[in-house]
Amino acid sequence: MTIRHQIQFPKDELTSINQDEAYFYLQGSGGKRKIRFHDYDEIYQVPGLYEQIFYDRLKCTSPGKVASILESAVKQYQNNFTELRILDLGAGNGMMGEELKKHGVSRLIGVDIIPEAYDAAIRDRPGVYDAYYVEDFTILDKDKKEEIAAWQCDCMVTVAALGFGDIPTKAFLEAFNIIKSEAWVAFNIKDTFFDRSDDSGFSKMIRELIFSKYLDIYYIERYRHRLSIEGEPLYYFAITGWKTSDVPDDFMEEKGLMA
């Protein structure tokens, strides 16, 4: 039986709220609680809350979109999609993993920085992941790095987790280098992150990586990620590419991407 929660979006000052500052109110036995959209640790602790907000109310389509373009790219180049061993970076409560499982992929390794994400994935989607690591990839120790690399992942996906400080630049590049030296990469980013007026470290890293020799872009599509709390569409790019080699430290340092 699906649990339905009493949630309320703010009605005042909507125009002054940035996407990463959006919040809602959750009505519970202890009264009304204000929770930011990016307070994932709090959201994941409430079964079904994440799905109700982002998928039922705000119509998020990203897991299906990214999985679809990844499968199309892989099949176009005559690789067997079901044999992929995928590292799901920022796996959260397993929405992307569940979508990939529908497509029949061989192995799924989840990674997230907060234990509440792991707890939610095990609670709500048991058996989706072959392994799930709660690790900070900006300070990953040698033993743990070798353990994750031993899964020999030949694909990395990350959905609705890039930008806004959720996954730091260093963590993304660390994961990029943990997967095999030649591998598929699929992710989505907010469309404004391609704008050169955005000088954030993450936006700069994505642009530098896309135009570098380390990643060949095979597919890119602008699509509606979800609705805002005002009901307006939020557009993202879904991107699939082929990793040609690891990104060396000197490249990252030269481009100022180590922060």
Image (tube, grey):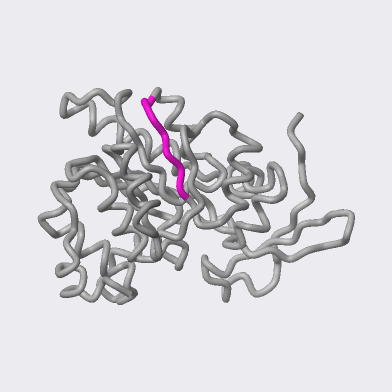
Is 15 situated above or below 118? Answer: below
Please say whether residue 106 is one of the residues in the magenta stretch: yes
- Locate the N terminus by quadrant: top right
In the image, what residue occupies the spot 29% across and 37% down? 152
In the image, what residue occupies the spot 25% across and 53% down? 177
- Secondary structure mostly taken by the magenta-highlighted segment of the chain: strand
Residue at the left extreme?
213
Name the quadrant containing residue 67: top left
Is 236 situated above or below 139? Answer: above
Q: Is residue 223 left or right of residue 214?
A: right
Q: Is residue 143 left or right of residue 241?
A: right
Name the quadrant containing residue 31: bottom right
Residues 234 and 140: in front is: 140
Is 161 situated above or below 194? Answer: above
Which percent across, then down, holds residue 44? 65, 50
Residue at the front extreme?
143
| Residue stretch rendered in magenta on the structure | 105-111
Residues 42 and 137: in front is: 137
Which percent across, then down, holds residue 2? 74, 33
Which percent across, then down, holds residue 66? 37, 40
Please say whether residue 173 is one of the residues in the magenta stretch: no
Q: Is residue 96 left or right of residue 70?
A: right
